[in-house]
Image (cartoon, helix red, strand yellow):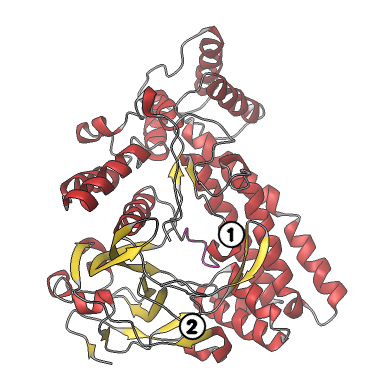
Amino acid sequence: MTQRTKAGWQLEQTYTKLPDIFYSAMEPNSVASPELFILNEPLAKELGLDPEVLADEEEILAGNEVPEGSEPLAQAYAGHQFGQFTMLGDGRALLFGEQITPSGKRKDIQLKGSGRTNFSRGGDGRAALGPMLREYMISEAMHGLGIPTSRSLAVTLTGETVMRERLLTGAVLTRVASSHLRVGTFEYAVRLTESENVKALADYAIERHYPHVQEHENPYLGLLQEVMKKQAELIAKWQLVGFIHGVMNTDNMTISGESIDYGPCAFMNEYDPSTVFSSIDVQGRYAYGNQPHIGGWNLARFAESLVPVLDDNQEKAIELAQNEMNKYKDLYFDAWHSGMCKKLGLLEMEAGDEQLIEQLLNLMHKNKADFTNTFRKLTIGEVPIEGEAFADWLKRWNERLERQAASAEEVREMMKRHNPNVIPRNHRVEEAIAAAVEREDLSVMERLLDVLRDPYAYSEEQMPYCAGPEPDAGPYRTFCGT
């Protein structure tokens, strides 16, 4: 296994400190003819990598070679997929290790679509170019929106095709994350029936993400509290920009509180809590309006997994877990309500604000108003919805703003910081993917990424990207891309 380090790789592999049941050491699967398709130069620099040198390291970015310090492995985990428990694992991903950045941060470097592993379960372990470009665009857009997320360093062509419904161009995504520890990793540990495995994993997660809870009277309870808080805040951020993950299985929920696995994800146009884009979510389990509830359901699975280490007395451990889970609803609502107040320029919350927010959302739903553009237009002083009912709401909102000890300019600036001017509109994402895959034209994607880097800029360059799809566009559907 050839190793190189020219680009500035500073890799460590701490995951191997865990019992070997948690991973499978793997050598990369080589590909026929690797060719770099797109490189995230700003992210490369953040990681301490030289973009010019990295651009020539297609062999690494495709998995033919590994950087110095890498101990490639596939992680084992489980997950509740649409509510059903399944043993899983990295069936098409390989963890190189953790890059130590110039600022001292530790970031997982993972190849997605890198070929078969011991967890592939009959799959080919490969990925197609289109879905990898989707993850690249959406993850970078989420980063621009200020939402915790995994990032995309590069997409590399493999020189091979993958067979799905038809032959597709093969590609590998280089993904960067604070870690790939998932709720499903803990479910996997507890199903092995040895509490030592749960303890080892929990200790690793604490050291990796929440070292301050080591001083907690009960560090494992502290871990549960931190993960709950992070996930409640994350899902609130999703709701505040109209993001729909599409497949909130427990194996897609990180311990770090980052968004991960952008398969059938999309952004809502018309406000409707029942909105579903994923072709496989036929029951609407992961609809926009269900995401907060599903977040709580997933966290309950995490809490159950920690029962063996929360207390030696199982009844006491279950009570501790239940007491914490009872706090989730308030954690989520406080984060969401605070965010909605900021979107409306409300510097301090007061009685009646909840009703004001709910009335606006009801009007948006009734009038099929665009979610992002409603708040964008309020921010710039335009009327987003016609009619007497909205005019009445607008009057009450303005009266509420006048009771604040803040100038109109201060209110507008706050709203600009919390209401994006642009989002990765679904039709724009599809347009960029089509140009790249069908014509090898990256210019459409690059222009889209440029306006999404600072979605709160309210610049002239962003204005063409504010419009929703044409009225006759028809229903939008997304697919897992496996």
Q: Residue at x 47, y 29 (%)?
A: 270
Q: Nearer the viewer, residue 378 or 295?
A: 295
Question: Dot 2, crowdedness within 10 Å: few (<14), some or many (≥20)?
Answer: some
- Whether residue 425 is visible: no
Q: Main secondary structure of the magenta part?
A: loop
Picture coordinates of residue 344, whole percent (x, y): 49, 30
Picture coordinates of residue 192, whole percent (x, y): 69, 83
The kind of residue tagged 1 is Asn
Q: Which quarter shows the N terminus? A: bottom left
Q: Is residue 29 left or right of residue 243?
A: left
Q: Is residue 233 left or right of residue 372?
A: right
> Which residue is label 2 attached to?
118
Picture coordinates of residue 276, whole percent (x, y): 54, 40
Q: Which quarter shows the C terminus? A: bottom left
Q: Nearer the viewer, residue 11 or 336?
A: 11
The kind of residue tagged 2 is Asn
Residues in magenta, as a range? 255-259
Q: Secondary structure at mark 2?
A: loop
Question: Dot 1, crowdedness within 10 Å: few (<14), some or many (≥20)?
Answer: many
Q: Residue at x 18, y 67 (%)?
A: 36
Picture coordinates of residue 408, whole percent (x, y): 40, 24
Labels 2 and 1 touching (C-beta < 8 A): no
Q: Earlier in the sequence, mark 2 or mark 1?
A: 2
Q: Is residue 439 above or below residue 416?
A: below
Per the rendering, the mark at residue 249 is: 1
